[in-house]
Image (spheres, grey):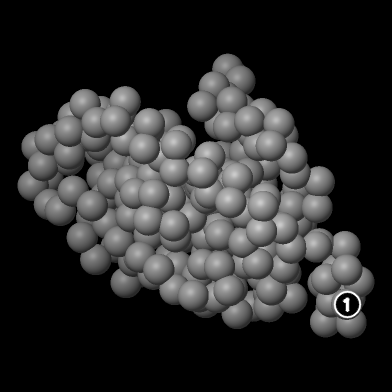
Amino acid sequence: MSSASKPALLRECAPPSRRDRALHRAFDILCAAAGLIVLSPLFCAIAVAIKVDDGGAVLYAQDRVGRDFRRFRLYKFRSMVAGADREGLLTSAHDARVTRLGHFLRRHKLDELPQLFNVLRGDMQVVGARPEVERYVQMFPVQYTLILRDRPGLTDPATLSYRHEDEMLSPTQPEHQYIEEVLPEKLRLSLEYQQRRTFLSDIRVLLRTAFPPLG
């Protein structure tokens, strides 16, 4: 997407009103708080399992770019060996850095659950484009200028379409494929949803996230 298209995009993607922001924030707090309470036994079980699996840290934190390009620390249950990100930011199928338990957590997206804390803190919202590391944000400034008018989210249609993203990436050139194919399409889907999202559509996205189709 060229920089010449920026004015048109800015007109099409009007920022949320103050009232809409307040309603979304109240919904996010309610969902995150309820999720943390209901899932607290699962959080404890995963933490114990990670410790038993390899004895390492339970949580993994990474800098991501949030609303208005402010950085924040995103949290996950650790699914890779310590220091794995020094060998690359992306994972592909059969990545040797993923732990035995990590494969299970990633397959079922359980490693993402600690981001409910990010939602509660106000770093993220429940439904919105996934937060990205600064390296990739800088490669798509026009799209992220629009997307980051609001908080990044736990899930959106792009997230659902690329639910098994690691299995799509080439083991030999994952970053090239991600930059040239995957991320541009995810940004297109996120921007498209941003223009037409409603409260009811957000509920549908949440239900599709929580109850993915079988097969």
Q: Place residue 106 in its image quadrant.
A: top left
Residue 152, horizontal then vertical, whole percent: 55, 57
Q: Place residue 108 in its image quadrant.
A: top left
Q: Which residue is rendered at x = 28% and y = 46% of the image?
A: 77
Q: Which residue was labeled with disc 1?
A: 7
71 relative to 196, above or below: below
Q: Amino acid at mark 1?
A: Pro
The residue closer to the viewer here, 26 or 188, is 26
Residue 178 in view: yes
The residue closer to the viewer here, 11 or 83, is 11
24 relative to 108, above or below: below
The residue closer to the viewer here, 117 or 161, is 117
Q: Which residue is rendered at x = 38% and y = 44% of the image?
A: 116
42 relative to 159, above or below: above
Q: In the rendered view, does 121 fall on the left or right side of 125?
A: left
Residue 103, horizontal then vertical, whole percent: 34, 38
Residue 33, horizontal then vertical, whole percent: 36, 37
Q: In the rendered view, does 10 fall on the left or right side of 122?
A: right
Residue 181 in view: no
Residue farthest to the front, as pictured: 19
Q: Quadrant of the N terminus?
A: bottom right
Q: Which residue is rendered at x = 62% and y = 61% of the image?
A: 150
Q: How many marks?
A: 1
Q: Which residue is rendered at x = 12% and y = 35% of the image?
A: 48
Give the SS element for disc 1. Answer: helix
Q: Quadrant of the C terminus?
A: top right
Residue 133, horizontal then vertical, whole percent: 48, 69
Q: In the rendered view, does 151 fall on the left or right side of 195?
A: left
